[in-house]
Amino acid sequence: MDMQLPDFGDDMLSSEEAGPIVPRAKAYILEYGQGGLVAFPAHTGVELVDQPRYVVVPGMPYFCQGLMAWQGRRIPLLDLNKFLRGPEAQRTSSVGHVLILAYQSAAGQALEYGAVLAPALIQMIDVIDSQQCALPADIAVLSGISLSCFEYEGRPVPVLDTARIFCKPVA
């Protein structure tokens, strides 16, 4: 049995709705501490885990909270506040939620996974080109790990590249 979608013709939109289509991209927006916001492309978000269990491993970089067990793997759990602001930054006090992120270490490679602390609610938002803005100048590491930056509620929000965070972290 063939299913055909109905043809609504050109009259589907009212005259108020007609006009150019504005491309939108979905992003997860996350507050990482001290009022700072970052975003991740929606396709990188895999799962939000409540009250994760993790193990602190001696010798890990200052921004790594530890290794977290997830789906039979051990994945790094990063504190974005420490990662972005440096070793002097306050450690995120609560590990209530973490966002599991996917990345590829190289094109054509299998997906790998890492996690970031999510001390506040994560939101899925639509981003449009007109929201683009400059990266915050006070966090130098952003220029090497950001795909872009947009303005949200009057604040700059860098879009972080998960592969650059987990494969080539800046220590």
Image (spheres, rainbow, N blue to C red):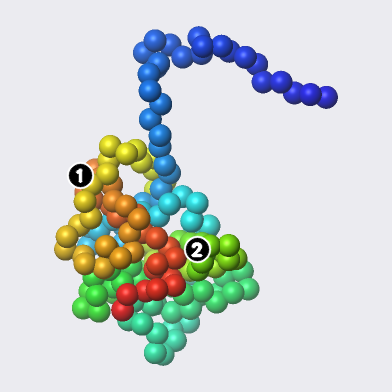
Q: Nearer the viewer, mark 1 or mark 2?
A: 2
Residue lying at 17% horizontally and 60% vertically, measured from the top left: 137
* Mark 1: secondary structure: loop
| Residue 121 sits above or below residue 59 on the image | above
The numbered mark, 1 or 2, whose residue comes first in the sequence reads 2
Q: Which residue bears the numbered disc 2?
A: 103
Residue lying at 36% horizontally and 41% vertically, measured from the top left: 127
**Residue 141 on image: x %, y %:** 26, 68
**Residue 74 on image: x %, y %:** 55, 77
Q: Amino acid at mark 2?
A: Tyr
Q: Which residue bears the numbered disc 1?
A: 154
Q: Is 75 left, or right, of 16 in this rendering?
A: right
Q: Quadrant of residue 1?
A: top right
Q: Residues within 10 Å of mark 2 (few under 14, many from 20)?
A: many
Q: Residues within 10 Å of mark 1 (few under 14, many from 20)?
A: few
Q: Amino acid at mark 1?
A: Gly
| Residue 5 sits above or below residue 86 on the image | above
Q: Residue furthest right?
A: 1
Residue lying at 50% horizontally and 9% vertically, measured from the top left: 11
* Mark 2: secondary structure: strand
Q: Nearer the viewer, residue 137 or 126?
A: 137
